[in-house]
Amino acid sequence: MTKIDAFLLRETAALEGTPKGAYNIRKNGRPDARNSTANIEIITKTDKPGIDIHIRPGTKQESVHIPVIITETGLSEMVYNDFFVGEDCDVDIVAGCGIHNAGSLDAQHDGLHTFYVGKNAKVRYVERHYGQGEGTGRRIMNPRTEVYLEEGASIQMETVQIRGVDSTRRYTKILVGKEAEAVITEKLLTHGRQLAESEMDVLLEGSGASGRIISRSVAQDQSEQVFYPRMIGQAPCFGHVQCDAILMGSAKIRAIPAITANHTDAQLIHEAAIGRIAGDQILKLMTLGLTEQEAEERILNGFLR
Amino acid sequence: MLELKNLSYQVDDGTGQLDILHNVSLTLEPHRFVVMTGPNGGGKTTLARAIMGLIRPTAGQILWNGADITPLSVTERAKMGISYGFQQPPRFKGMRVQDLLELAAGTGSLSRDECCQYLTRVGLCAADYVDREVDAALSGGEVKRIEIATILARKSGLMIFDEPEAGIDLWSFAKLTETFRALHARREATIIVISHQERIIDLADEIVMVSGGSIARHGPKDEIFPHILADTVAGCSYMRQAVSQ
C-alpha cells in the first residue's frame, strides 16, 4: 500500500491500514484485498463489475468496509455492489471513494449500491467521497443508491463529500416498508468550479413508515449545487425533509424539495433555508477572540459536523 | 480603567446625518459595577458595541487601561480582556453549548464539570444543555443565559452585559442577580450592565444614564437613582398628570 493509498483510505473510510471484520478494497478498477467472515460473505459478480455482500440473519455488531481508491488518471469505471442484509441484523457498512488524480485525464467512479434489508434489521451506512491530486484532470463520482427496507427494518445513511470532487451526480431511492425507518444525512462542501447534484426519492410505502432527510451543505467560490429531495407518503406515515445551505463567494444553490401525500394519514414536513453566514455569528465568535477567518471556519465545521 | 473621550457615532439615514452618540466622555475606575440605563433608543447598546469594536465611532477615542484601542479590531479587543454579551445572541446550527463555552474560555477543552459550573451560574441545569446545539430549538431565554455563561467563561477584565434580564423568567433572574453580586464581590473585573431592572440597578456602584445619544447623568447609585424615577415621570405628560392626581 502506497502513502497515497493509505491517505485515501483514511479520508474515505476512516481506516488506518487494513480494516477489521469483512472488507473489500478496490483499487484502480481491480479488487485489491478482501476478507469474508463467518457471517459476512463477499463474492465477486460474474456478469458485471462489482460484488455481492451476504450478511447472515442475526449478525450483530459487525462491519463491512468496501472502499474504492483510484490513483490512475483516465480511469473510468461503473461498479455494481449488492448488499443482502438478513433479518434481525445490526451492522455497519462503510463505503467510500477516494480519487488522487495527478494527470490531465478525468478519473471517474460511478457505482450502484443496492441494499435489501430484511425484517427488523438495522443498517448504518456511511459513504464518504474525497478527491485530490495536482493534475488538471477532473475527479468525478456519480453514486446511485437503492434501498429496500422490509417490515421494521431501518437504515441510517450518512453521505459526506467535503472538497475535492469536481463533479458529482447523486441519486438515492429508498422504499420504506411497514414500521420501517430511513434517515439520510447528507453533508456536502463544494468549492472552485465544482458541480454537485443530489436527487432523492424516499417512498414511505408501509403503514407506520418514517423517513427523514437532513441535508447540510456549503457552496464556496463559484461552485454550484442542486438538490431535489422528494418524500412520498403512500400510507399512514411520517416524513421530514430539512435542507440547510450556506452560500459563500459567488456560489449558487438550488433546493427543490417536494413532499407528496397519497394517503390522508401521511404527515409530511419540509423545511429549506439557503443563506450566507449571518454577520452576527461571525461577530459573536470574534468577541470570543477568534479572527474573522477562524470564526468562519468554526461555523462551517459545526454546520457540517 | 475605561475611558471614553468625546465619542460620537453618526449614521446616514437617507435624509442626512443622524447622531446616535454625541460627544460622549466617560471614565470608569477599575472593578466598578456600573449599570447603564435610560430610555429605549437612547444609545446604550451603541455605546457598548463601540467599546467592543462592533461599530466604529465616527469621532473620539476609547482607552482601556491607558491603551488607545479605538483602531483595534473586535478580536484584538477580546484578546485584551474586553467581552460583550449580545442583547440578541445569534444561534449556531451544529455548535454545541460546550463548544461555545470552550471557545469563550479559550483554553482548548473544558471538562464537563467546568461547563456545568458556568451553566449553573446562569440557572441552567448543565446536564440538560452541555450537548445541545445552540440552534433554533432553544428558547430566547435559554440562548440568552448561554450567552451570559460564555461571558463568565471568558474571565475578562471588562465585562459588558446588554440587557441580560431580557427574556429570562423570574426564577432564573433571581439566580442571575446573585451571580452578578458574586462576580462583583471578587473585584476582578469592571462590569457594565445595560439594564432597566431595579434589582440589578441595586447592585451598582455607579449609574450612567444615557439619553438622546449623550450621558444625561453619571454618579454613585444613591445619588443618581432618585433622578431616574423623577426623569421618567417628568418626561411624560400622562405620567405627570397621574402623579399630580
Image (spheres, grey):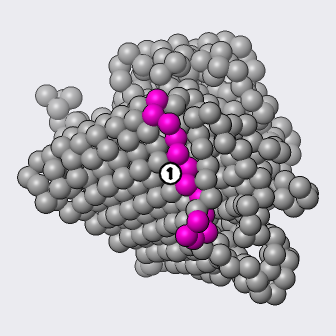
Under mark 1, the amino acid is Phe
Taking the magenta stretch, the answer to whether it contains residue A48 is: yes
- Residue B158 falls left or right of residue A197: right
Start and end of the magenta stretch? A46-58
Label 1: few (<14), some or many (≥20) within 10 Å?
A: some
Q: Nearer the viewer, residue A133 or A191?
A: A133
Q: Nearer the viewer, residue B56 or A258?
A: A258
Q: Disc 1 designates what residue?
A: A83
Q: How many marks?
A: 1
Q: Residue furthest left?
A: A264
Residue visible at 52% across and 31% down? A59
Report helix, strand or loop for mark 1.
strand
Q: Nearer the viewer, residue A95 or A89?
A: A89
Residue visible at 57% across and 35% down? A39
Whether B176 is drawn above or below A56: the answer is above
Whether B29 is drawn above or below B70: the answer is above
